[in-house]
Image (cartoon, grey):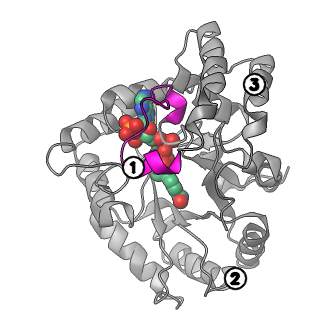
Amino acid sequence: MNEISNETRFLHALEMGLGAWQWGDRTVWGYQPGKSDKDIHEAFEISLKKGIRFIDTAELYGNGRSERFLGQFLRETDRPVLIATKFFPWPWRFTKGSMPRTLKGSLERIGVDSVDLYQIHWPSPLVPPERMMEGLVECVKLGLTRTVGVSNFWEKRMLRAYSALAQHGVPLASNQLPFSLLKRDAEKNGILARCKELGIRFIAYSPLEKGLLTGKYSVDNPPPGVRAANYIEMLPKLPPVIQALREVAQNNGKTVAQAALNWVICKGAMPIPGAKDAEQAEENAGGAGWRMSDEEVARLDEATERIRNYGGKGA
Ligand SMILES: NC(=O)c1ccc[n+]([C@@H]2O[C@H](COP(=O)([O-])OP(=O)(O)OC[C@H]3O[C@@H](n4cnc5c(N)ncnc54)[C@H](OP(=O)(O)O)[C@@H]3O)[C@@H](O)[C@H]2O)c1
């Protein structure tokens, strides 16, 4: 394994974070203005109380609402919070200056002078990784972010990003990719191992497979909205996975969701589950702070072996 740089060490010390896509997003998560605000504030509060310090947001989430909520919540807490947000590479944002300019917009919405991690949300078909990295380096130089990362960059692109940053003496702090018991591509295609080898923190998004790995959804009770269509083929395959999770959870005095999150941690990735209210956030926080046995990891691996490659591989 490459030596982890001092700048990025804090990320490797974190077991879990909290995803904030739900804060203000109506299309996938059914956020309701006014009605959901108290619930998401409580989700934030209880997460901090339970030791979660890293919040993952993006300018895209709720068209900036998620970042604004984070700013509002930060003003009402004394607890230290690590902030990660993301740049979306719209086709008109191709110059080196686009990134610092966009990040300044995020900083204004959050109400801070700098963030802890600035990530490129998706690769761009128009702008090569090397050019994008120049923008990130600029953000570091201007002191707008402590570290930089990428998201949805699979191995080839990630390595190009890593090398381009290295030429400027900036470490690639993280790569955020989909990873859960139902989406194990990152483990199978080697990028998870590659991240560990290079000291890049692997951040696992949708670690509960958008709620499926909590055990509450089934063929008879599908998730609401757009998720129902996305998971139509997956739902019939779910019962043996939930059964295996239930066994592991019971052995450890935990819940199904906590076992699903702990499996991600045992694989060496940092899950950032999203939570809509205090109850979900509190349960999810209990996915960290313990380890299932190697045999239990193997039992869950086996239960999901044939489900590999479900969903897209990303870019
Ligand atoms: N970089 C990217 O491209 C990208 C893409 C996706 C996500 N992300 C990040 O990753 C974070 C997490 O991923 P995600 O939100 O897609 O999926 P997730 O964490 O797998 O699932 C979150 C959803 O599952 C349900 N849930 C969560 N905890 C629960 C519990 N304890 N009991 C019952 N239900 C529970 C809630 O929805 P319901 O109650 O409605 O079921 C919640 O909104 C996001 O918030 C975002 O920060 C990044």
Residue that label 2 marks: 130
Mark 1 and ligand 1: say if the CB distance to the nearest ligand atom is below 8 Å: yes
**Which amino acid is tagged 3?**
Val
| Residue toward you, 277 or 222 | 222
Q: Is residue 13 visible?
A: yes
Q: Where does the magenta region start and end?
A: 212-231
Nearer to us in this view, 173 or 270: 270
| Lower position in the chain sequence, tag 3 or tag 2 | 2
Structural crowding at the residue carrying mark 1, measured as other residues with C-alpha within 10 Å and reported as few (<14), some (14–19) or many (≥20): many
SS at mark 2 in the image: helix
The x and y percentages for residue 29 are: 35, 49
Secondary structure of the residue carrying numbered label 3: helix
Q: Amino acid at mark 1?
A: Ala
Q: Quadrant of residue 279?
A: top left
Q: Is residue 290 visible?
A: no
In terms of secondary structure, what is the magenta stretch mainly?
loop
Residue at image point 49% right, 32% down:
219
**Is label 1 in a helix, a strand or a loop?**
loop
Tell me: is circle 2 under 8 Å from ligand 1: no
Residue at left 41%, top 52%?
A: 226
Residue 20: numbered disc: 1
